[in-house]
Amino acid sequence: MKSILSLAFVFACTCTSFAQRSAPIISPDVQDDHSVIFRLRAPKSQNVALRGQWQKEPVPLTKDAEGLWSLTVPDVPAGVWEYSFVVDDLAMIDPVNPAQKPQRNPTSSILHIPGTPPNPWDFQDVPHGTVHQHTYLSKALSKQRSAWVYTPPGYEDGKQKEYPLFVLQHGSGDRQETWVVHGKAHWILDNLIAAGKAKPMVILMIDGHPLGQIPREMADRRALSLAAFKNELFQDAIPLVESHYRVSADRTQRAIAGLSMGGWQALSIGMTNQDRFAWIASFSGAVDENEIKPALDDAAGTNAKLKLLWIACGEKDFLLERNNQLIAKLKASGVNYEWHETPGDHSWPVWRNYLTDFAPKLFR
């Protein structure tokens, strides 16, 4: 009898231990008071820290007897935030959080805390558009490529014959889906359209790295990449949209914008292809003067063709000085522009605001 009881006790302890080890880990775990618990099972690791976009310095986690690291962060502000675990000096995503920032080299997970009242990038109870994913063979590049396309609420009912087309590009470390998955561009447009602040439009987002990710210092290679991107945009991506969606061919109904690298692409391509785009924006981008020289040399022609040249950069952005140089050159050349130096640095919380501010100006 004692043996049976002993076996039962061992079995119960084993099951309890197994249940503790196999219990699902929740991370991030958002509490009602807006505190957030982060957890990571890493029993053999010596140090684990949390690097969150809402805070300046990494914060260490504490390990329990089972090898589960945890940290409770109080009062995380509302927003869409990036965060990583730093495990023995290696930055990594949160392995139990399916919300990951699309990057060329993924290291960041996403924490989204809605605001009260809701922010423009929060999901709201309004009519919603559709995000379409396309894979195609690029004739310009002779390889498989991808694009995401947003159509506004009501597009499928067919009542509106044509829509404006807005090309929206990501930054150097990101991919074609980042403006949706992390930037929440689709919700921003849904909310603006529902509020009557923006016109319904189709948005095209393509991979901005036709030749792969290229370091900033490789100027010659970056020039080749820009040319390849332009060829793909004009020969493949825009024709794909034109063949699948009801978009206007009128240049005054076409816009191009982007953040960081995408802002450089928008300025370089938009300013030198004013027969295709009447609306151009750069969010924390930069461009060399020689890349837009024809537009600068013919300021009268540029001003006659462009409906809006919109440029913005954060006061703590490492590209602010280059933006100031561009603004000075535009002013000296007589090219009309709208300039915004804003709070913030080179990051997504800044760029979501820029899209929120710029989109209502389009196609008016």
Image: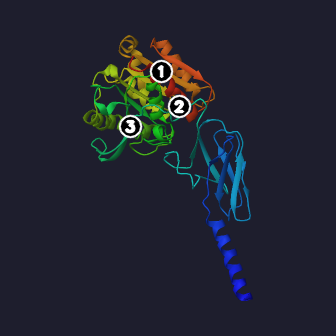
Q: Quadrant of residue 290?
A: top left
Residue 95 is drawn in which quadrant? bottom right
Q: What crowding class fits label 2: few (fewer than 14 Cα within 10 Å), some (14-19), or many (20 or more)?
A: many
Specify whether 40 is left or right of 105.
Answer: right
Vertical arrangement, residue 190 with respect to residue 310, above or below: below
Proximity of marks 1 and 2: CB atoms separated by less than 8 Å: no
Q: Which residue is mark 2?
A: 352
Q: Which residue carries the number 3 mark?
A: 130
Type of amino acid at the residue the image marks with label 3: Thr
Q: Is residue 309 above or below residue 178?
A: above
Q: Which residue occupies 66% across, 51% down?
A: 38
| x and y, in percent, of residue 132 in the image | 36, 41
Whichever of labels 2 and 3 marks the residue nearer the N terminus, that label is: 3
Above or below residue 91? Residue 319 is: above
Tell us which disc is closer to us: 1 or 2: 2
Characterize the local packing of mark 1: few (<14), some (14-19) or many (20 or more) Cα atoms within 10 angstroms.
Answer: many
Q: Residue 80 at x, y = what percent? A: 57, 38
Count of labels in the image: 3
Question: Disc 1 designates what residue?
Answer: 310
Q: In screen coordinates, is 141 left or right of 217?
A: left
The reply to whether residue 207 is visible in this rendering is yes
Q: N-terminal of the two: label 1 or label 2?
A: 1
